[in-house]
Image (spheres, rainbow, N blue to C red):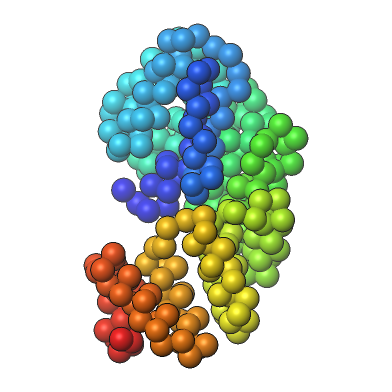
Amino acid sequence: MPLLIQKMIFMLIVVITLSACNQVRSSNQNIRVSQTTSKIATANLDLGIEYLKQGAYENALKNLEKAKKADPVYAPIYNVFGLLYQQLGDTKKSEENFKRALSLNKNDSSTLNNYSNFLCQQNRIEEAEKKFLKAASNPLYDSPEIAITNAGLCLSKNQRERDAEKYFRQALELNPRVPQALIKMCEISYNQKEILTSRAFLQRYHEVARHTPRSLWLGIQIEQQLGNKDTVSSYVLQLKNNYPESQEAKLLDLSRIQ
């Protein structure tokens, strides 16, 4: 499963009648079900999302079709169809379904978020940025910092670091505990040679998220710059023990960091 789509699938908040799973706080994206519909539609939509997360696309498609049959004007169904077809590589059907969802609920921040990520992947950057900001501007959206962070990530991937930094800072003003914004600000600060600021962002990141190969590698670089050999050794040990097959662990041998 491509990493970007895998992240998108696991960036879901599913709120369906009595079931709610707030995954935004753990680096996840939204599907918010705010309309009312039949139990058959919501049950099958729920199953479709679970199968999509597992990579069982045929079963996901079957359940989404059942949900659509039960309620053909329930916008969240088409939002998830968009994610499914994006995963399957059918960009035409993916976009058609995102647009269908928005035709039924034009201000739905979940769909706007997912469609914006789709547009970013298609290198339609200006369109993506506008829709991320539209998602964030919805007064009913309880996590606008996620859409703003996503806008920053999209621009960062397309070498617009100055604009991306603006969005990361804005997101952190709304919620100082967004992991993606914190780790990106750590990177940006390091690249700007603001080493102590970079370290502070990394410390804040580790307060809200587990270390990854990427964050440990950043920690190694930061502490090397500050001359803290013991801390460098601690990060190196964590990287070797927890992520021995990662690209960052392989870089240790090339860089001769001990």
For the point 75% across and 35% down, which residue is it?
A: 139
Q: Which residue is most to the front?
A: 230
Asked if residue 48 lies left or right of residue 77, the reply is left
In this rendering, the answer to whether 48 lies above or below 215 is above
108, 226: nearer the viewer: 226
Q: Disc count in the image? A: 0
3, 12: nearer the viewer: 12
Quarter in which the C terminus is drawn: bottom left
182, 147: nearer the viewer: 182
Q: Is residue 234 visible?
A: yes
Asked if residue 192 lies left or right of residue 82, the reply is right
For the point 58% across and 14% down, which residue is it?
A: 36
Q: Indicate the quadrant where residue 87 lies.
A: top left
61, 28: nearer the viewer: 28
For the point 28% across and 33% down, which residue is it?
A: 56
Q: Position of residue 172 (x, y in %)?
A: 67, 57
Q: Indicate the quadrant where residue 49 lies.
A: top left
Q: Position of residue 104 (x, y in %)?
A: 62, 22
Asked if residue 27 lies left or right of residue 175, the reply is left
For the point 34% across and 27% down, which residue is it?
A: 60
Q: Position of residue 1 (x, y in %)?
A: 31, 48
